């Protein structure tokens, strides 16, 4: 089979879990299995399950997080603005607008691809109520500084931790502390539910808003469904969405979580280290920096190719049949999010011109990684 850039690692155990829901349980929507997944993840993170909300995508998680922290009322004009690094999946930006807010594209640091707080400070507006740091390539770089920045400027922090499930900062798991932390369980993330996402909201009121908003903001519908019931006399006070997770998805996710620490974590770390070892002596190739206090479970493997050579090196790999990704086209360059009055973002554009993503997933062998490295070395030598 041709090498893949990323892929889901699922098999018989996940299929059996889905079969159990379909054949034995027959309740496919949001019910007991979703509650069990929330409890499993709460135990893994070491936070109360009452702060969690499992949803159908990471984008939905971010949308609910922005909605719950934003001032004003959904649908009554722009509610406020959120600082977001431009180098992220378009989901981060779409989530901000989906909740009726405005994203402010910020520069990223060339060494890490994470938000540049000095730049973010210059872009702060009167109506800015939150910062959405993205743990780019699973790297929680600067997370303490991001919280300090937020406290200094009266902002909430919405962590886009879509890449960072299982990562730790300073011995603490991402999602075990903070304001609001959002994970993605889409097909290729560190664990998957097929699709899926999760919000951890540390403020009790915000957690409640998010749990209800995933089910059309029907008051207490989550509690009813977890007991196998429904709310037949709904009270609805605000905008809501159909963002809840299904029992089928939760069944997949529970198996994935049980495989995560013993199977996926060591493989992802090992393959990422192998890339570093194999490419250490290639002068044109640079890895992103990380903090020695951080324990990273890498979701993607970006590298920088210096001196303007990335496009040719990337093409050489593609010609050799090796898939190479782009994470990401900066969002300020996308028509819908382009703001012609905003200050330019030269550092982000320069990094975008250097970055390319090499294959990384637990289905790769050491030989696969060595083959990619050999092709990359050859491409650099043949420039
Ligand atoms: C995957 C991802 C998301 C969105 O998650 P989905 O589950 O795909 O909706 C958001 N932000 C980043 C950085 C991502 O990689």
Image (cartoon, rainbow, N blue to C red):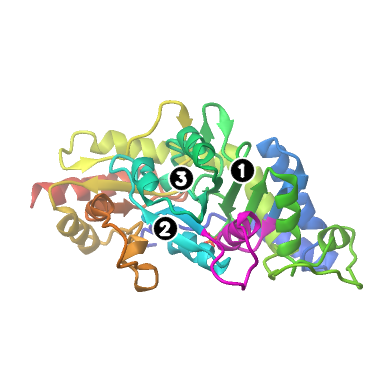
Q: CA distance from mark 3 to mark 2?
A: 17 Å
Q: Position of residue 199 (x, y in %)?
A: 64, 52
Observer able to see residue 114:
no
Observer-nearest residue: 73 or 34? 73
**Residue topped by disc 1:** 179
* Vertical order, 27 against 44 (above or below): below
Observer able to see residue 279:
yes
Q: Position of residue 65 (x, y in %)?
A: 61, 55
Residues shaded magenta: 54-80
* Magenta segment includes 79: yes
- Determine the image quadrant of residue 248: bottom right
**Residue topped by disc 2:** 104
Please report whichever mark, 1 or 3, sits nearer to the chain's N-terminal start: 3
Observer-nearest residue: 122 or 57? 122
Of circles 3 and 2, the one toward us is 2
Residue positioned 80% across, 67% down in the render: 218
The dot on residue 135 is 3
Residue positioned 76% across, 61% down in the render: 212
- Determine the image quadrant of residue 261: top right
Determine the secondary structure under disc 2. strand
* Vertical order, 373 against 222 (above or below): above
Q: CA distance from mark 2 to mark 1?
A: 20 Å
Determine the secondary structure under disc 3. loop
* Magenta segment includes 256: no
From the viewer's perspective, tell me whether residue 17 is left or right of residue 76.
Answer: right
């Amino acid at each position: 089979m041709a090498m893949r850039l990323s892929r889901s690692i699922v098999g018989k155990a996940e299929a059996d879990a889905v079969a159990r829901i379909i054949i034995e349980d027959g309740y496919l929507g949001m019910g007991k299995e979703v509650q069990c997944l929330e409890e499993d993840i709460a135990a893994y993170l070491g936070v109360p399950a009452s702060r969690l909300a499992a949803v159908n995508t990471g984008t939905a998680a971010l949308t609910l997080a922005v909605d719950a922290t934003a001032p004003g009322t959904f649908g009554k004009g722009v509610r406020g603005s959120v600082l977001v690094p431009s180098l992220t999946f378009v989901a981060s930006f779409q989530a901000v607008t989906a909740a009726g807010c405005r994203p402010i594209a910020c520069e990223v640091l060339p060494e890490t691809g994470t938000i540049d707080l000095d730049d973010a400070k210059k872009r702060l507006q009167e109506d800015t109520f939150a910062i959405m740091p993205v743990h780019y390539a699973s790297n929680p770089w600067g997370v303490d500084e991001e919280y300090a920045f937020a406290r200094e400027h009266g902002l909430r922090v919405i962590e886009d931790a879509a890449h960072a499930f299982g990562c730790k900062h300073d011995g603490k798991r991402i999602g075990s502390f903070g304001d609001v932390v959002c994970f993605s369980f889409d097909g290729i993330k560190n664990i998957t539910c097929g699709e899926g996402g999760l919000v951890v909201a540390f403020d009790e009121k915000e957690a409640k808003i998010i749990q209800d908003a995933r089910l059309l903001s029907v008051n207490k519908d989550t509690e009813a469904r977890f007991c196998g019931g429904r709310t037949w006399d709904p009270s609805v006070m605000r905008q809501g969405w159909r963002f809840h997770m299904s029992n089928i998805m939760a069944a997949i996710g529970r198996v994935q979580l049980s495989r995560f620490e013993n199977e996926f974590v060591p493989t992802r770390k090992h393959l990422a280290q192998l890339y570093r070892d194999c490419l250490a002596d290639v002068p044109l190739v640079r890895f992103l920096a990380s903090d020695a206090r951080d324990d990273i479970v890498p979701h993607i493997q970006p590298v920088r190719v210096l001196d303007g050579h990335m496009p040719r090196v990337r093409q050489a790999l593609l010609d050799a049949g090796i898939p190479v990704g782009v994470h990401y086209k900066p969002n300020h360059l996308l028509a819908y999010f382009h703001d012609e009055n905003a200050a330019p973002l030269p550092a982000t554009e320069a990094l975008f011109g250097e970055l390319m993503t090499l294959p990384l997933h637990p289905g790769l062998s050491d030989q696969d990684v060595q083959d990619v490295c050999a092709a990359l070395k050859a491409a650099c030598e043949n420039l």
